[in-house]
């Protein structure tokens, strides 16, 4: 029996990179996948890729910063598709301005990154909470190495703060919902080659080299490297795991 049979899985930011890979992986394990993304075309393409490979998926546009839209989406999915038992909070953006950069840019980075990477996780989780509680759901939040440390990739204080926040939110929710059988965990990806960092990879090859030299496995990650940890945390394989973060960083944080 596939590991995620009979589950309905919602994945935010599923139109690209890690979210798309998780959508394909979950579908391979039998989940019915709902791909959500602010980029409607990207989400639709993910659903098509799932269908083309024999899985079941649909897609909807959703901006995770729009709390009312998140609530409406949860109702729409409950009415039209069924009870959601897996939520992957994956949507995220990265910005590269340090605190001492131009004031306008620093303020905009803070507002955008916190709104998407942290408040967005709250918005979507809160919207789907009824269904997740009723179905002993599993929540998988995408954190980062920067849930623990700040990395000079360069990265922004907003990004580091948002990913620390995601881990804190993960722990708080795991504690609050544990007795109901709802499990809440995070994944901490290392440097994964996706559109998120394509510009940085192109403009800062020395930074990439330094990062990989620090990484025991000696290579950048691919979106597929996050799929196994996501299936583990969403499935019964991790039945006694909650409030945890699985690092998928090539060993970066061990050094
Ligand atoms: P990605 O390829 O850029 O995919 C992120 C997706 O989220 C994009 O489709 C993006 O749409 C979408 N998105 C952005 N804002 C949104 C919003 N307000 N509402 C809904 N969707 C939104 O990036 P990725 O590398 O796969 O990143 C996925 C997650 O992994 C993020 O949380 C990121 O912080 C985390 N992560 C990535 C790495 C890495 O090295 N790649 C490392 C650690 C953690 P647009 O393209 O239209 O913006």
Image: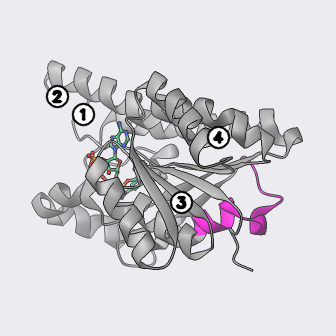
* Residue 33 disc label: 3
Which residue is denoted by mark 2 in the rendering?
Answer: 101
Marks 4 and 3 sit apart, C-alpha to C-alpha, by 22 Å
- Residue 29 lies left or right of residue 163; in this view the side is right
Please tell me whether residue 238 belongs to the stretch shown in magenta: yes
Under circle 2, the secondary element is: loop
Q: Nearer the viewer, mark 3 or mark 2?
A: 3
Image coords of residue 243 (percent x, y): 72, 46
Could you tell me if the residues under marks 3 and 1 are in contact, i.e. CB atoms within 8 Å? no
Q: Quadrant of residue 35?
A: bottom left
Q: Earlier in the sequence, mark 3 or mark 2?
A: 3
Under circle 4, the secondary element is: helix
**Which residue is more in the foreground, 65 or 189?**
65
Instruction: Tell me the residue at 38%/44% (across/down).
Output: 92
Specify start and end residues of the magenta stretch as a single range.
Answer: 229-243
Which residue is denoted by mark 1 in the rendering?
Answer: 98
Q: Earlier in the sequence, mark 4 or mark 1?
A: 1
Crowding at label 3, few (<14), some or many (≥20) Cα neighbours within 10 Å? many
**Which residue is more in the foreground, 255 or 70?**
70
**Which residue is more in the foreground, 2 or 241?**
2
Q: Earlier in the sequence, mark 4 or mark 3?
A: 3
Which residue is denoted by mark 4 in the rendering?
Answer: 170
Marks 1 and 2 sit apart, C-alpha to C-alpha, by 6 Å
Q: Eyeballing the image, is 251 above or below 189?
A: below
Crowding at label 4, few (<14), some or many (≥20) Cα neighbours within 10 Å? many
Image coords of residue 125 (percent x, y): 59, 35
In this view, the residue farthest toward the front is: 80
Could you tell me if the residues under marks 1 and 2 are in contact, i.e. CB atoms within 8 Å? yes
The answer as to whether callout 4 falls within 8 Å of ligand 1 is no
**Which residue is more in the foreground, 226 or 247?**
226
Crowding at label 2, few (<14), some or many (≥20) Cα neighbours within 10 Å? few
Marks 4 and 1 sit apart, C-alpha to C-alpha, by 26 Å
């Amino acid at each position: 029996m596939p590991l995620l049979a009979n589950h309905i899985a919602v994945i935010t930011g599923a139109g690209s990179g890690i979210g798309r890979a998780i959508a394909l992986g979950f579908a391979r394990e039998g989940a019915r996948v709902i791909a959500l993304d602010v980029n409607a075309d990207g989400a639709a393409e993910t659903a098509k890729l799932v269908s083309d490979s024999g899985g079941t998926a649909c897609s909807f546009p959703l901006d995770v910063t729009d709390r009312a839209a998140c609530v409406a989406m949860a109702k729409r999915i409950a009415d039209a598709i069924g009870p959601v038992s897996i939520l992957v909070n994956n949507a995220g953006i990265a910005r590269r301005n340090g605190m001492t950069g131009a004031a306008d840019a620093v303020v905009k980075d803070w507002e955008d990154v916190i709104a998407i990477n942290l408040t967005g996780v709250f918005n979507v989780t809160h919207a789907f909470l009824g269904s997740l509680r009723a179905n002993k759901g599993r929540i998988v939040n995408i954190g980062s190495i920067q849930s623990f440390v700040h990395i000079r990739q360069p990265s922004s204080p907003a990004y580091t703060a948002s990913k620390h926040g995601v881990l804190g939110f993960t722990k708080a929710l795991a504690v609050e919902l544990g007795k109901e059988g709802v499990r809440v965990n995070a994944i901490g990806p290392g440097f994964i080659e996706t559109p998120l960092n394509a510009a940085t990879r192109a403009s800062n090859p020395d930074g990439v080299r330094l990062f990989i030299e620090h990484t025991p496995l000696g290579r950048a990650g691919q979106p597929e490297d996050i799929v196994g940890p996501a299936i583990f945390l969403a499935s019964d394989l991790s039945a006694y795991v909650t409030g945890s973060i699985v690092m998928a960083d090539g060993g970066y944080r061990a050094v």
